């Protein structure tokens, strides 16, 4: 009997936003793997550190942060090879995935390499997009709204087209594209409809009306724009949470 | 001290897909409210029935299923009035929300009426969209993909435009629009890219390549289409789960 590969959605950051299922699987799996930048600790591991038992085998998948090239094929080839040894021994492997494993997640690169050879189960998780709407106090989408998720890495015209054709837009992967995207939203008169969020559900989360956000944005940030069917949403004050130590 | 109104995301159907936080809040709140059709039991309540203690006050929000008109303003006016009595007494009220409260959820109608008068917290949940991708064994979106969520209630041309401009599309609220939507996807040569899902994460879930689905679809069904950056996804066999008693 080979082990099972689990892609565990562990939510946006608050350890309490794990599902009961992810919590159970994590408690039972003898091997826990997680992405880790070569520049510091693993965010995924930090979310669930209190739930990882000391007798677990931990396997960090070290992803180089120096390059824009992604996926780092060699990294996932090696990780798949190493994890398959545990699976062959009959040990379950739980791979920690920030948010949801299949929503812009890197778990797919392991899934691609291992799911045809081993039993594999993806445990869905709370996405930062849903947690962001909850924190903002604004629906993500309602009724017959069209919702579009657009990576901020795309060119202005690609983003602008979707803004024009959607009732609600989530712009992810903001990071160093922040100033360009804010200018674009200004030119489209959409800043008043937009909320800015970073490090959602964590102690140091920042939530601001986009109009009040000027500084550089980290990679884990997003902008939510609502201009859909519910008029009251647009008139709603955007929540503001700013940790005293955020700067 | 007034009570707190909680919008509790309880996930797509599997009781184990509640978050630890939703489980805790549900266990502590003296009042539990949930939508209930006037034609039968509450789906939301059935998801968490094992977690509701007998000494809880239960408040079904009975939503008429006879009409297309929605929101049923009078229903939410009355529910907000009744729940505010509990809140004024200092009792917390947990409102059960299938999936995520702010992702096409009806919780927003209570939030609109009560959030300016009472402390309110939205607890995000696992969306059926994420659970659907997990069950299909296919990423919802990856890398720089554009993901669009389109209600199947919209006209063909609205849906077709988004299909053309997105790498991944989720069509929700399929129900009686199934035949029309499948024909549309056939005319666009997208059926081979599409998975059909209903009652995701429940014992009676059905997951099929769209090409194999012909019968009528229930309201709680969706179609996922992936034609994004990851070539291997398109070549992946779509999972198939069909409960023996489904028919």
Image: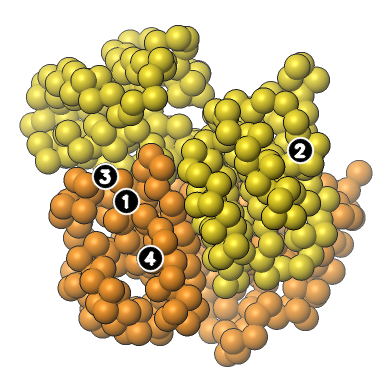
Chain colours: A orange, B yellow
Image: B163 above or below A217: above
**The C terminus of chain A: image quadrant:** bottom left
Circle 4 marks a residue in which chain?
A: A
**Pair 2/3: label in front:** 3
Distance CA(mark 3)–CA(mark 4): 17 Å
Circle 3 marks a residue in which chain?
A: A
Q: What percent of the width, then of the height, locates residue A41?
A: 52, 74
- Disc 1 and disc 2 on one polypeptide chain: no
Work out whether residue B233 or residue B160 is closer to the camera in this orientation and state it.
B160
Residue topped by disc 4? A164
- Disc 1 and disc 3 on one polypeptide chain: yes
Work out whether residue B25 or residue B205 is closer to the camera in this orientation and state it.
B205
Label 4, residues with CA under 10 Å away: few <14, some 14-19, many ≥20: few
What residue do we see at 66% from left, 34% from top?
B179
Q: What percent of the width, then of the height, locates residue A220?
A: 43, 70
Distance CA(mark 4)–CA(mark 1): 11 Å
**Pair 2/4: label in front:** 4
Work out whether residue B232 or residue B183 is closer to the camera in this orientation and state it.
B183
Name the N-terminal-most of marks 3 and 4: 4
Distance CA(mark 1)–CA(mark 3): 6 Å
B10 displayed left or right of A189: right
Q: Are marks 1 and 3 in contact (CB under 8 Å)?
A: yes
Residue topped by disc 1? A228
Residue topped by disc 2? B208
Residue topped by disc 3? A230
Q: Are marks 2 and 4 in contact (CB under 8 Å)?
A: no
Q: What percent of the width, then of the height, locates residue A4?
A: 79, 48
């Amino acid at each position: 009997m080979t082990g099972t590969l689990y892609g565990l959605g562990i939510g946006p950051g608050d350890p309490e936003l794990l599902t009961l299922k992810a919590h159970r699987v994590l408690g039972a799996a003898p091997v826990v793997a997680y992405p880790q930048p070569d520049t510091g600790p693993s965010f995924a591991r930090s979310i669930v550190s209190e739930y990882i038992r000391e007798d677990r085998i931990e396997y960090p998948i070290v992803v180089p942060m120096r390059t824009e090239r992604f996926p780092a094929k060699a990294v996932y080839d090696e990780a798949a090879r190493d994890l398959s040894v545990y699976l062959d021994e009959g040990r379950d492997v739980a791979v920690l995935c920030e948010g949801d494993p299949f929503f812009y997640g890197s778990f797919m690169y392991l899934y691609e390499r291992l799911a045809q050879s081993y039993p594999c189960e993806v445990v869905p998780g709370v996405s930062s997009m849903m947690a962001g709407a909850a924190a903002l106090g604004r629906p993500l989408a309602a009724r017959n709204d069209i919702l579009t998720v657009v990576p901020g890495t795309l060119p202005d015209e690609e983003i602008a087209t979707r803004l024009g054709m959607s009732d609600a837009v989530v712009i992810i992967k903001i990071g160093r594209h922040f100033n360009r995207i804010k200018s674009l939203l200004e030119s489209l008169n959409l800043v008043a409809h937009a909320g800015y969020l970073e490090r959602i559900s964590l102690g140091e989360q920042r939530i601001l009306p986009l109009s009040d956000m000027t500084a550089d944005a980290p990679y884990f940030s997003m902008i939510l724009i609502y201009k859909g069917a519910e008029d009251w949403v647009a008139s709603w004050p955007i929540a503001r949470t700013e940790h005293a130590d955020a700067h």
